[in-house]
Image (cartoon, grey):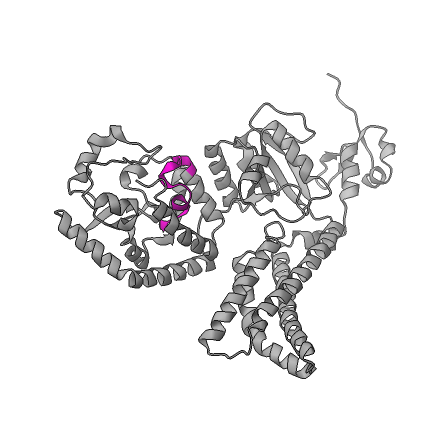
Amino acid sequence: MRQASTTEVPLSEALENPESTSGRAPTLRIANGMPLTLQPDEVMRDVRARRPRLITALRQARAPQRFARFASLLALDFAAVFGAIFTALAVKELVRGTFVLDKVSGQAWDYFPFVFLVTALVFALSGLYGSREERPGLSAVLGGLFWVTVVSFAYALVNGLDFRSYYIFYGGFLFALLWVGGLRWLYERATDLMLSAMGRSRRAILVGSGDQIEAVARALSSNGSATRYETLGYISLTPRPENGLRDLGELEELPRLLDEQDVQEVIIADPDFPQEEAFELVDSCNERGVAVRIAPTTMEILTQEHQLVPGQTVPLFELKPPVFEGMDFVVKRTFDVAGAAALLVVLSPLLGAIALTVKLTSRGPIMYRSRRPGIGGQPFDCLKFRTMHTDAERRQAELERENEASGALFKIKRDPRLTPPGGFLRRFSLDELPQLWNVLRGDMSLVGPRPLPQRDYDRLLDWHRKRYLVLPGITGLWQVSGRAELDFDELVRLDFLYLERWSVFLDLSILVKTVPAVLMRKGAF
């Protein structure tokens, strides 16, 4: 085989006049005397990619970018909230014909500190200070301002503030929607232009199957995308497609690629990506601080309530590590303690009546302590009102063949071990109410993945057990999404969906939806 000839050409000449190489690869002599061969197309790419050092430094400085984003959005909301209050008061005074600038400004500054503080907290919990790829759209702004209005109204009532009318609340809400929505829209447009001028892009690897990889890569490279992507290549689980992208090899090589390349995202572009490999992929990426996102199929977009990122041609949903930490943990734990204590007080008559019924209808203790794995697999006593006879655990082995649930679960609709009131208590989940005490003790959360008995836990696959990275819950998406009628793998996926999208508002929504789900007895046995 004839070797390709190599001719030494000064780098400056090669950069300024690529034709001078006459089709030969220019060579640059570096300090140790070893030759570095540059292909002509690589020389052209280096020329086009060259940017001033200041711009390159700004692109790579991620921490300052995050701070600048948060500070600019917070300042924007500062101006918008004050503008909304001032406008609402000014319109009122103008209609009355009593407008005085100093008076209106003074009133606006009186209301402003509390309203802005609540707005900043609600917006932060709603993700409205996150990265541009993650920030929700106008619907989240609308929902956040609604809750700000509700909290402000409740605060005014509690503190005995007198108003001749409630115009300041609904008027302030309408003007806040105009001010906040308008300024944030201008912010998005301005940052779009700035990022385009800087040539900012995110380095990504696509993983999936051939056709889907090509479609996602084409969409991400379109001019309509809000974020510019530099696709480093692809890893395909099917025979290698010819799509013009770089083939990066097998899935097993992904950890090495993440260590060697400056990868910012791994995008799963496959509707049928194997779930075991997906969780291994997520673990590898999370360990290295690389974001994992999924490009859903058209059917998934149509059948689920996803909120698209404005301006994106492909909606991308990030898979974060399934843990609660930092401020998220503090907020969730505070919500759990307050909610559990309040429910124990309100439901105390019902708890007393159930305890008396259990005591009078069968022999044995009122409470059943079910030893179950909790957070990190550590066992704890999960409290329940006893709904079965005392020999229930001994008889379970002989009933295994009658199991009607899928996967690791054990369920029988007409379980012969139930006590007379046991079926009623279980069907309406009343036996679970003592777990409010587990919440106060820190063993459980009000909302989260349901803790499974040790028998079921021992049958879980490795990827199933990642749901135990957080405190188990009394209720969750299982209970409001079909309960026992769902396949076990679907139930686990609901757990991960909850962990990914958690917020206090989501917990409240699940708690509210649990009541009709229990009363309708859908899928419960």
Pick the front one: 328 or 476: 476
Residue furthest toward the left? Answer: 363
Which corner quadrant holds the C terminus?
Answer: top left
Q: Position of residue 478 (x, y in %)?
A: 39, 43
Instruction: Locate residue 96, reporting x and y percent.
Output: 67, 79
The answer to whether one can see residue 129 in this image is no
Residue occupying the point 76% across, 38% down: 29
Q: Quadrant of the N terminus?
A: top right
The answer to whether residue 467 is above or below residue 62 is above
Q: Is residue 133 visible?
A: yes
Residue 395, given in percent of the width and then of the height, sits at: 18, 35
Residue farthest along the top direction in this orientation: 1
| Rendered location of residue 123, percent (x, y) | 55, 61
> In the image shown, does 440 or 376 lie closer to the viewer?
440
Q: Is residue 112 above or below residue 216?
A: below
The boundaries of the magenta stretch are 473-490
Q: Is residue 21 left or right of residue 89?
A: right
Q: Relative to 406, is 50 above or below?
A: below
Viewer-proximal residue among 319 and 367: 367
Q: Residue at x 25, y 50 (%)?
A: 384
Question: Residue at position x 65%, y 49% from top?
Answer: 310
The stretch drawn in magenta includes residue 210: no
Report the number of discs.
0
Front one among 101 and 109: 101
Using the rendered view, name the quadrant where residue 75 is placed: bottom right
Figure check: 24 above or below 380: above
Q: Is residue 254 left or right of residue 96?
A: left
